[in-house]
Amino acid sequence: MKKLIFNYTKKNFSYKESIKICYKVINQNYENFPIYMFFLKKDMMNDFASIYAFSRGVDFIGDELKSDEVDKALQIWRSELDLAFDGNPSNPIFIALSKTINKYKLEIEPFRRLIKANEMDQHITKYNSWDDIFYYCDHSANPVGDIVLRILGYTENSNITFSNKICTGLQITNFIQDIKVDHCKNRTYIPQNLLKKHNLDFSSINKVTKNDINFLSKFDNLLADLIQENQQLYDEGRILIKNLSKKHAIIINIFLLSGQTILNKIRNQKSNILFKKPRTNKLEKLYIIIKATVSVLLKR
């Protein structure tokens, strides 16, 4: 992955070469949602690919690079972003992104917020309350929804608000799903006041076994609170689908149902998510696309 986003000796990449690299980034990463949407026109799929490659690239910097590499890498990402908006980037991901930016006249602020989220990750390891988590999500997740809606042609504040609910919901589902993964990075995206409420200490969570009945019972109670908050976000954000055209509603519904599918797995697995991370396979993702399409068409 590092070689895909950095370390280019070649200069003057063509758009065709650049977008090909964006698709390589897609192919090297797992997501809860289907990234390839076969019903989209190639040009729009390319636009989404460039957005994904940028977003996944900055997440890779914040999550996977060594601590002494992160600041320099984020600075490169910021500089290339500025160049993409000026029309003269050198990194192929940003060459592809620049075309998307110009095509839809996108604003730079959502992209900068995505970078800031990864800067926050370098010095904030815990969040006290849901409000703190929501603030983080307003940088780490909500900007993507903002960008996608603008690509689809929607700029109304009410739609952005509903989009934020869905995006924050997707991020929180991922937080629950990755509790152990994040702990290995010395990060906890579960509100500390909830941990105190359930008398839970995550310091040794990676050593928990299925025999630790007391811990697992408390963890199940914590999950119930997390799932309730997460479900409310999905339910409130679902209104967005009614405000969009059928084709665009299907796209958003795919993201929503993808998050809902993982949340349902978490609800069913309970504390077993600590031993087997819930994921969706290719067949399930195909089913999500079909279900999202049918549900939109039947309700219109």
Image: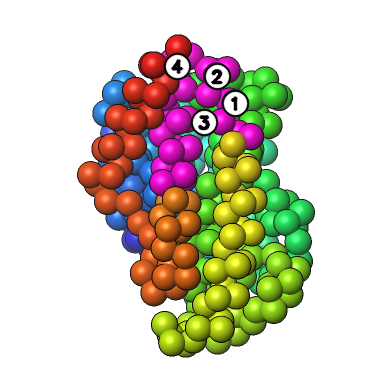
| Residue 90 appears in the picture as rendered | no
Q: Nearer the viewer, residue 45 or 32?
A: 32
Residue that mark 4 sits on: 299
Q: CA distance from mark 3 to mark 1?
A: 17 Å
Residue that mark 1 sits on: 239
Q: Nearer the viewer, mark 4 or mark 1?
A: 4
Q: Nearer the viewer, residue 41 or 1?
A: 41
From the viewer's perspective, tell me whether residue 121 is left or right of residue 127: left
- Pick whichever of labels 2 and 3 is earlier in the sequence: 3
- Pick whichever of labels 3 and 4 is earlier in the sequence: 3
Q: Nearer the viewer, mark 3 or mark 4?
A: 4
- Span of residues in magenta: 236-261
Q: CA distance from mark 2 to mark 3?
A: 16 Å
Are the two marked residues, 2 and 1, in contact with CB atoms closer than 8 angstroms? yes
The x, y position of residue 136, in whole percent, is: 68, 54
Q: CA distance from mark 3 to mark 4?
A: 23 Å
Tell whether position 246 is magenta. yes
Residue type at numbered disc 2: Lys
Q: Quadrant of the N terminus?
A: bottom left
Residue type at numbered disc 4: Lys
Q: Secondary structure at mark 2?
A: helix
Predominant secondary structure, magenta span: helix
The x, y position of residue 129, in whole percent, is: 76, 61
- Pick whichever of labels 4 and 2 is earlier in the sequence: 2
Are the two marked residues, 4 and 1, in contact with CB atoms closer than 8 angstroms? no
